[in-house]
Structures are given as C-alpha cells and as structure tokens.
Image: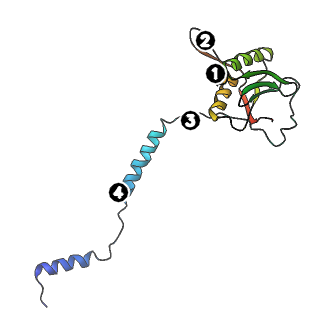
C-alpha cells in the first residue's frame, strides 16, 4: 500500500510519541503554591481568644482548699446566688425585668474582693437549661470589673474560674 507523504509523516509522529502518557503535574504544583500562600496570608488576620478553665474533677466533692472563702456563683433559672461553699448563700440576686442582675453581681463581687483581696479563684455553677451566653456574661463579671471614669478601665476580681453543675 502506498501512503501519501502526509500520512507517513503523521504515523511517524505518532510512533515517536507512543508510550508517553505522563501526567503533567506542573499546573497542580502551581495551584498548591498559590493555595498555601493564600492560607498563610489569611491566617494572619484570624484571632482566637482562649480562656483557661479549671473543670472540676471526680474528687471535687471533698475539696482540698485552705480555710477561708470558697466563692461559688450559682446561676439558676430564676436568680443568681453568690455563696460560700462552707457557709452557704451570701447574696441572692433575682431576675430584673426578665434578665439577670449582672450589675448587682459585679457590685457584690467587688465588695467580696475588698474583703478577700488575695482570693483569685471562684466557681461558676450552672443549672441544666441556662444559656451559654449567660455563662459567658457571668464569667466576665466574675473575672473583671469595669470602672467608669474619664476612660473605661478594667480591674481584676477572680480570674481563676472553674465551671460546674449547680447543686439541686
């Protein structure tokens, strides 16, 4: 059979490149370099706040604490109770207009801090159906207080916070 010059050239080129079915990874590497650069660049702008909590252990029924105040803030559905583990409830703050009295809590905790200035730990105990947002707000009020002046300043109350379940 006689083939034309063009057909022979095409079959020769096909024979030359036969068996070269390699994967071209250069575009994939380019995309990975761009993706890594993008992830590193955007990670700079994210900021995460982490707050360390001391969760009660299995042996928390018998505390190994020194004599003095063992401050507990008990958040219930109808009120907030500030208590001492040994003596009981010190102050009960009922709901004000269907909201927790966080201002009264902060004021009372400042009085407690004035009486026990070296005390740094407190426990926040929650009933079952208390909202997470309420926990965060109470935790903020237990940890720090705000003083209004020429500028807002923040002072430390009880920064070492433990979280647990409220007694029934």
Q: Can you tell which mark lies on residue 97?
A: 1
Where residue 40 appears, as percent x and y from the top left, is 46, 42
User: What is the spatial separation of the Cα atoms under label 3 and label 2, in whole angstroms?
Assistant: 28 Å
Residue at the spot of label 3 = 48
Looking at the image, do the residues carrying marks 3 and 4 touch, with CB atoms under 8 Å apart? no
Number of the front mark, 1 or 3: 1
Residue 155 placement (x, y as % from top left): 66, 17
Which residue in the protein does label 2 denote? 148
Residue drawn at point x = 29 percent, y = 77 percent: 18
Residue 135 drawn above or below residue 93: below
Mark 4 highlights which residue? 27
Mark 2 vs mark 1, CA separation in Å: 24 Å
Tag 3 secondary structure: loop
Mark 2 secondary-structure assignment: loop
Mark 2 or 1: in front is 1
Task: Decide which of tag 2 and tag 1 comes sooner along the chain.
Answer: 1
Please state which of the two labelled residues, at mark 4 or mark 2, is closer to the viewer: 2
Pointer 3 local density, CA inside 10 Å: few below 14, some 14–19, many at least 20:
few
Please state if 40 lies on the left or on the right of 59 as rendered. Answer: left
State which mark lies toward you, 3 or 4. 3
């Amino acid at each position: 059979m006689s083939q034309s010059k063009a057909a022979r050239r095409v079959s020769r080129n096909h024979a030359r490149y036969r068996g070269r079915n390699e994967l071209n990874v250069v575009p994939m590497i380019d995309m990975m370099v761009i993706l890594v650069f993008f992830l590193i660049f955007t990670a700079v702008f994210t900021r995460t706040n982490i707050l360390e909590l001391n969760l009660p252990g299995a042996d928390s029924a018998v505390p190994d604490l020194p004599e003095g105040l063992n401050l507990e803030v008990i958040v219930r559905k109808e009120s907030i109770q500030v208590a001492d583990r040994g003596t009981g409830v010190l102050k009960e703050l009922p709901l004000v207009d269907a909201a927790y009295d966080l201002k009264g809590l902060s004021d009372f905790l400042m009085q407690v801090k004035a009486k026990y200035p070296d005390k740094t730990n407190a426990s926040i105990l929650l009933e079952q159906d208390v909202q997470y947002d309420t926990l965060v707000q109470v935790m903020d009020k237990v940890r720090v207080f705000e003083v209004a002046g020429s500028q807002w300043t923040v002072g430390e109350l009880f920064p070492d916070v433990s979280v647990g379940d409220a007694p029934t």
